[in-house]
Each structure stands twice: as structure tokens, then as C-alpha cells.
Amino acid sequence: MTAVAIRPVTTDDADWIKQFTAEYWGDTVVVSRGVIRDPQQLPGFVATQGDERIGLASYHSVAADCELVTLASIRPGAGVGTALIDAVKARASQAGCRRLWLITTNDNLNALRFYQKRGFVLVAVHRDAVTRARQLKPAIPLIGADGIPLRDEIELELLLEHHNEDIASAGEQHI
Ligand SMILES: CC(C)(COP(=O)(O)OP(=O)(O)OC[C@H]1O[C@@H](n2cnc3c(N)ncnc32)[C@H](O)[C@@H]1OP(=O)(O)O)[C@@H](O)C(=O)NCCC(=O)NCCS
């Protein structure tokens, strides 16, 4: 089986990112904490297998804070999500970030399990934030995964350590 590789996003990925975001987030933009973000405009990493793109992580850094804006993999359970997070962690550390944080939603039990098992901790429940986000992005459904009403933004964070080996591995890598 062809190995999975992780590489930084390039301008050639723009059309694919647009399509991928629409598929996973129901629109070409995502909303977190009341801010609309366009993953096509953000730095990130793409997971590839041969010629095929199979996963995406996008992030946005402000000073010591790095937000993981999107993370998705079309091959669940193959280590792609973990490898993408590791790449973002390394890059954020390299850029001097101290905190990697993200928003997921109250229905996304898979993501809550996934992130907590990878060191992220819950820091806040922003009650009804999705109801407000829906005013910016009407495509957000009322009912989310597993038939759960889609209502709250849940904030998780990972405090970053600075290691030289993180910096060395921030470029292309294979899993
Ligand atoms: C969350 C997500 C990015 C994880 O990506 P992934 O490539 O499946 O991640 P990994 O393969 O590294 O790890 C997945 C975990 O699921 C397990 N798994 C095994 N088979 C699986 C399957 N068929 N489906 C889902 N997970 C499976 C893996 O063993 C691993 O288990 P662990 O967390 O107990 O260690 C992915 O499920 C996804 O794209 N979800 C939809 C988008 C989303 O919700 N993104 C997060 C929103 S903030």
C-alpha cells in the first residue's frame, strides 16, 4: 500500500481545499468564536497517498496562540489525523506559539475523544455559540452527528513545548 505523506499546503491546493471544506463543513468557510475563516487563505498541511489528497489541517496563528481551524481525513483510523496534528504542533512550536487550541461542536463525540486522547484538554463550553454562528453561516444544520442538536462550541487546548526535534520535523514527513 502506498505510504501516506504530510506536506505543507501550496497555492495549487486551493480548489481542492474549497471542495474539501464544503464537503466536511457544509460551506467553503468555517466559523469559530464568531469569526468566519476561509481555509483556502490559511496555512496548513495536506495528507497525500500517491497522487491523492486524503486529509487537511488548516491553522491560524496570532502571537502565542495557534488555532487549529480545520482537521479532517477521508481515511479514518489510518493515522492521518494524528500525523496532521503532529505537523501543526511542530510548526506552531517553531513559530513560537505556546498554545494550540480549537473549537469543535457538542455533537462531535468522535472529535472530543480523538483530541483528548492526543493531549488536548477541555477549557470552555461556549453555550449556544453555534446558534450565533448560524447567523454568519446559515448552512450549519440544526441537528448534528448522531442526531444530537447542534448548539455549543467546545474549546480545547494543548500547551506546546519547544523541542528542537519538533522544529526538525515540521516539513514533509511520512507515516
Ligand atoms: C477526527 C478525525 C480528523 C480523525 O482523523 P483520523 O485520520 O481518523 O485519525 P487517526 O487515524 O490518527 O486516529 C483515529 C482514531 O480512530 C480509530 N479508528 C479506527 N478505525 C476507525 C474508523 N473506521 N473510523 C474512525 N476512527 C477509527 C483509530 O484507531 C484512532 O483511535 P484512537 O483515537 O483511540 O487512538 C476524523 O475522524 C475526521 O476527519 N472527522 C471528520 C471531521 C471532523 O470532525 N474534524 C474535527 C472537527 S474539529
Image (tube, helix red, strand yellow):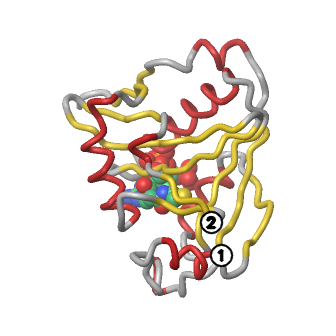
Please tell me which residue lies in front, 62 or 147.
62
Q: Residues within 10 Å of mark 2 (few under 14, many from 20)?
A: some
Residue shown at 46%/86% (left/top)?
143
CB under 8 Å between discs 2 and 1: yes
Describe residue 6's horizontal placement relative to residue 160 as left or right.
left
Q: Residues within 10 Å of mark 1 (few under 14, many from 20)?
A: some
Secondary structure beneath dot 1 equals helix
Q: Position of residue 170 (x, y in %)?
A: 55, 20
**Residue 99, relative to residue 23: is it above or below?**
above
Residue at the spot of label 2: 34
Describe residue 167's horizontal placement relative to residue 175 as left or right.
right
Quadrant of the snapshot with the N terminus = top left
Question: Quadrant of the rendered structure where residue 22 is?
Answer: bottom left
Describe residue 53's horizontal placement relative to residue 64 as left or right.
left
What is the distance, in whole Å, between disc 2 and disc 1 at their CAs?
Answer: 8 Å
Question: Quadrant of the rendered structure where residue 126 is?
Answer: bottom right
Tell which circle, 2 or 1, labels the residue nearer the N-terminal end.
2
Between disc 2 and disc 1, the foreground one is 2
Quadrant of the snapshot with the C terminus = top left
**Residue 138, relative to residue 70: is it above or below?**
below
Residue at the spot of label 1: 129
What is the number of callouts on the image?
2
Q: Amino acid at mark 2?
A: Gly
Question: Quadrant of the rendered structure where residue 122 is?
Answer: bottom right
Q: Position of residue 145 (x, y in %)?
A: 46, 77
Q: Position of residue 83 (x, y in %)?
A: 50, 35
Q: Is mark 2 within 8 Å of ligand 1?
A: no
Describe residue 33's horizontal placement relative to residue 110 as left or right.
right
Residue shown at 37%/61% (left/top)?
24
Please tell me which residue lies in front, 70 or 63.
63
